[in-house]
Amino acid sequence: MHSGKRFGALEFATWTRRSIYVLTILAAVPTVLYCSGWKFVSVPWQPIAILGTAVAFIVGFKNNASYSRLWEARQIYGAIINDSRSFGYILRDALSGKDPQKVKEMFQRHYAWLTALRFQLREPRAWENMGTAQYDEYSKKYDIPERLTKIDDELKNYLSETELQYILSKKNRATQLMASQSKELSELYSKGDINDFQWTQINQQLVKFTDDQGKAERIKNFPYPRNFSSITTYLLLLFILFVPFGLLKELDKLGEGTVLEGWTIWFNIPFSLMVTWCFHTLDSVGEASVNPFEGSPNDVPITQISRTIEIDMRDMLDESDLPPAITPKNNIVL
């Protein structure tokens, strides 16, 4: 998540520079051909304007859908924050007078669940963008914690060696950690350490965590529909290709009767670049938000949120050696 006031203009230009190079060439080629006497390469601008209207609608639709996915992901982790705090004080108050060690173990297992979940959500998918040069280059400005450490090393801070090996042997580790919490809770209920009401309360919190995890996995594992994504790409490409051809005659006429006559045709390059860059960058902005867990600078900061939850829950147990909060690097925090 970018935590600064805004992306800088130079930063934005650098991020999109590859597209600027390509768009400049696409604008220069028809301009040079037209100036070389190939007047027939010019096409009427009206059909291109109609195509541009269609592209504007579909790019707007994509950006709206991308923002919805991003906002839903943030709401899911907002729910995890609230549910974790509720789980913490309900469990603490139910067991602290009977088995404080068990409370600490279940707290530790919850931190492990948060860790396993964020590692699972950071796993790459074929449709995500972090493998492309544009995103990979920008990612060097900040840290993606799940790429710097291994899940084994993270989980061993919270689990016993026996439980660690058991969890690492599972495919969906977050699910199995929540299942272990449920098993532990059932054992406490069977021994009479918690009553019916307390068991119901704590169990409801576990159900909420499972629900939150499923919602996050749905966003992670179901991409923005490929049919909408594909048609947006194809229409945008057609528009970008035809814009420089549609502005040729209009810009050539611009200088008639003035000292610029014959020279205004060269305005086609910057004007075409400006129009096509706007459309292409709007599409890129939507694409940058459509996968909110992949590790881009526009993602939900799930690692920071997980650390915040851990600090809050450790504070509930009056622990003094709290882990440090995760701070932004170059205005980016994940």
Image (cartoon, rainbow, N blue to C red):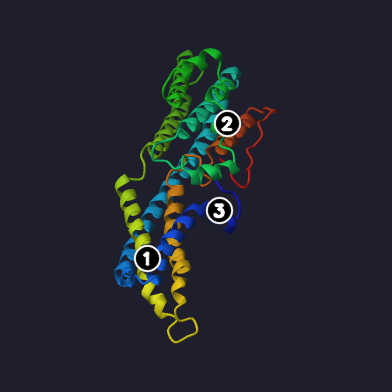
Query: Residue 296 at x, y = what percent?
Result: 51, 43
Asked if the residue under mark 2 is in contact with the one under mark 3, i.e. CB atoms within 8 Å, the reply is no
Quadrant of the frame with the C terminus: top right
**Which residue type does callout 3 highlight?**
Thr
First in sequence: mark 1 vs mark 3: 3
Residue under pointer 3: 14
| Residue 243: mark in rendering | 1
Query: Residue 204 at x, y = what percent?
Result: 43, 30
**Which residue type does callout 2 highlight?**
Leu
Residue 294 visible in rendering: yes
Q: Secondary structure at mark 2?
A: helix
Identify the residue shown where x is 33% and y is 72%.
39
Residue 171 in the image: above or below residue 140? above
As measured in the structure, the alpha-carbon distance from the residue carrying label 1 to the one carrying label 3 is 23 Å
Residue in the foreground of this view, choosing between 213 and 61: 61
Residue under pointer 2: 148
As measured in the structure, the alpha-carbon distance from the residue carrying label 3 to the one carrying label 2 is 25 Å
Residue in the foreground of this view, choosing between 269 and 120: 269
As measured in the structure, the alpha-carbon distance from the residue carrying label 1 to the one carrying label 2 is 44 Å
Asked if the residue under mark 2 is in contact with the one under mark 1, i.e. CB atoms within 8 Å, the reply is no
Identify the residue shown where x is 48% and y is 56%.
21
Q: Label 3 neighbourhood size at 10 Å, few (<14), some (14-19), many (20+)?
A: some
**Which residue type does callout 1 highlight?**
Val
Residue in the foreground of this view, choosing between 322 and 49: 49
> Looking at the image, is mark 3 or mark 2 nearer the viewer?
3
Q: Residue furthest bottom?
A: 257
